[in-house]
Amino acid sequence: GQNIDQPTEMTATEGAIVQINCTYQTSGFNGLFWYQQHAGEAPTFLSYNVLDGLEEKGRFSSFLSRSKGYSYLLLKELQMKDSASYLCAGRRDYKLSFGAGTTVTVRA
Amino acid sequence: SQTIHQWPATLVQPVGSPLSLECTVEGTSNPNLYWYRQAAGRGLQLLFYSVGIGQISSEVPQNLSASRPQDRQFILSSKKLLLSDSGFYLCAWSQLGGYNEQFFGPGTRLTVL
């Protein structure tokens, strides 16, 4: 299966860095996505990793280690607008299995 | 560019009433289509997906059904709603090939009373 585990909540200060970890079981797994979801809104795509290593996109970076069943999303230079839920999702064929999400609260 | 629409945006229905939620995609052809439900404080649960007209795969047993009468139209239905059907319903699409990033519609918030 693809059980996806991530922390429920994290709090950080504006301008700081936060790392959101995600672990999963790798049976049949072939890719890892990160989505951002603001309260009451639909998820929006942030990043995708299919190979091991770090993918950087502006203030957001995502890392994947397939052998360890581990990924993280790194948010740098936090802004108040980054307060949201961050969803880790594993891909199997064309289906995604989502974790419950990590709610990040950015404080001034 | 591609866009995805869902309606209605919000819905309040009594237990036992029928349901019909609609999702349409513009600007692409032959998309994969998905219905998810998100209960309060929970992750997204995949309900149905479709890789073509008239083709529906169900992920979880439930009193909901889905149909795809046209290439870019996906409908979620129920004959009799349960209290447990309350939630945020999201439609998504992805393109065949590539890494299948899924794009989500704005969602329908359903409250069953």
Image (cartoon, rainbow, N blue to C red):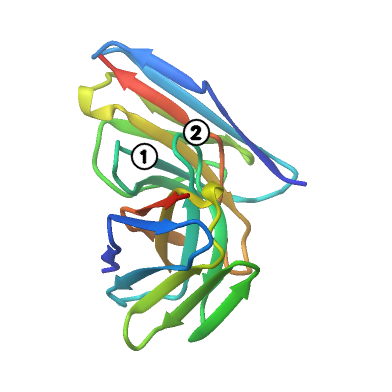
* Whole-percent x, y for residue A77 in the image: 56, 64
Q: Which residue is mark 1?
A: B37
Q: Amino acid at mark 1?
A: Arg
Callout 1 environment at 10 Å: few (<14), some (14 to 19), or many (20+)? Answer: many
Q: Is residue A83 left or right of residue A45?
A: left
Residue B34, above or below B63 = below
The kind of residue tagged 2 is: Gly
Residue behind mark 2: B107
| Residue A65 location, quadrant | bottom left
Task: Pick the residue in front: B65 or A102.
Answer: A102
Whether residue A56 is situated above or below residue A12 in the rendered picture:
below
Q: Nearer the viewer, residue B70 or A21?
A: A21
Marks 2 and 1 sit apart, C-alpha to C-alpha, by: 9 Å
Q: Could one spot residue A7 in this view of the protein? A: yes
The residue shown at (28%, 61%) is A7
Position of residue A44 in the picture relative to residue B30 (left or right): left
Residue B102 visible within the image: no
Question: Can you name the residue that lies furthest to the front here?
Answer: A108
Residue A62 coordinates in the image, percent (x, y): 50, 73
Residue sitting at x 56%, y 56%: A45
Does A26 appear above or below A96? Answer: below
Q: Name which of mark 2 and mark 1 comes first in the sequence.
A: 1
Query: Mark 2 belongs to which subunit?
Result: B
Task: Give the residue displayed 35% in from the left and 54% down from the top.
Answer: A101
Tell me the SS state at disc 1.
strand
Tell me the quarter of the picture where residue B37 sits: top left
